[in-house]
Image: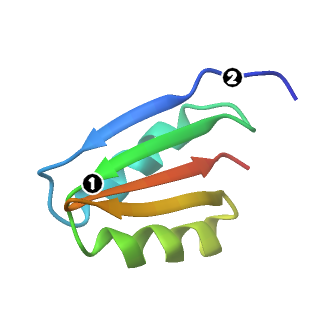
């Protein structure tokens, strides 16, 4: 697999469902194996990203919350 630059998406300040919709759009434009880091302040995004990864087949490699900012690392499948 080739090394791809990490794509970053700042969705802080956006309410549900916008962080997930913006992440889906970004993933659609990416190549298989490429990684996307999403930052969100929406508490509902925790469940949204977990379920999205399960249903879409993309990998949720990491998820964390720090000082009200939720960070997700996805890999396009």
**Is 56 situated left or right of 69 in this image?**
right
Callout 1 secondary element: strand
In the depicted structure, whether residue 37 falls above or below residue 64: above
Q: Position of residue 4 (x, y in %)?
A: 69, 22
- Give whichever of discs 1 and 2 has the lower sequence position: 2
Task: Identify the disc placed on residue 40.
Answer: 1
The residue positioned 54% from the left and 32% from the top of the image is 29
Up/down of 33 relative to 48, above or below: above
Check the image and report above or below for 1 versus 43.
above
Q: Closest to the observer: 17 or 64? A: 64
Q: Measured from the top left, where is residue 54 in percent x and y?
A: 63, 74
The residue carrying pointer 2 sits among few (fewer than 14), some (14 to 19) or many (20 or more) residues within 10 Å by Cα, namely few
Q: Which of 7 and 62 lies nearest the eye of the viewer?
A: 62
The residue wearing badge 2 is 4
Q: Is residue 73 left or right of residue 56?
A: left
SS class, disc 2: loop
Residue 39 rendering spot, x and y as whole percentages: 32, 48
Identify the residue shown where x is 42% and y is 32%.
8
Q: Position of residue 49 (x, y in %)?
A: 45, 67
Quarter of the figure with residue 42:
bottom left
Give the residue drawn at x 36%, y 37%: 9
Q: Quadrant of the N terminus?
A: top right
Mark 1 and mark 2 in contact? Answer it, CB < 8 Å. Answer: no
Rendered residue at 15%/53% (across/down): 14
């Amino acid at each position: 697999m080739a090394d791809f630059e990490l794509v970053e998406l700042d969705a802080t300040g956006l309410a549900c469902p916008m962080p997930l919709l913006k992440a889906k759009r970004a993933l659609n434009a990416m190549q298989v194996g490429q990684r996307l880091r999403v930052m969100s302040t929406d508490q509902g995004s925790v469940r949204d990203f977990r379920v999205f990864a399960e249903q879409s087949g993309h990998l949720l490699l990491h998820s964390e919350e720090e000082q009200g900012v939720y960070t997700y690392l996805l890999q396009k499948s």
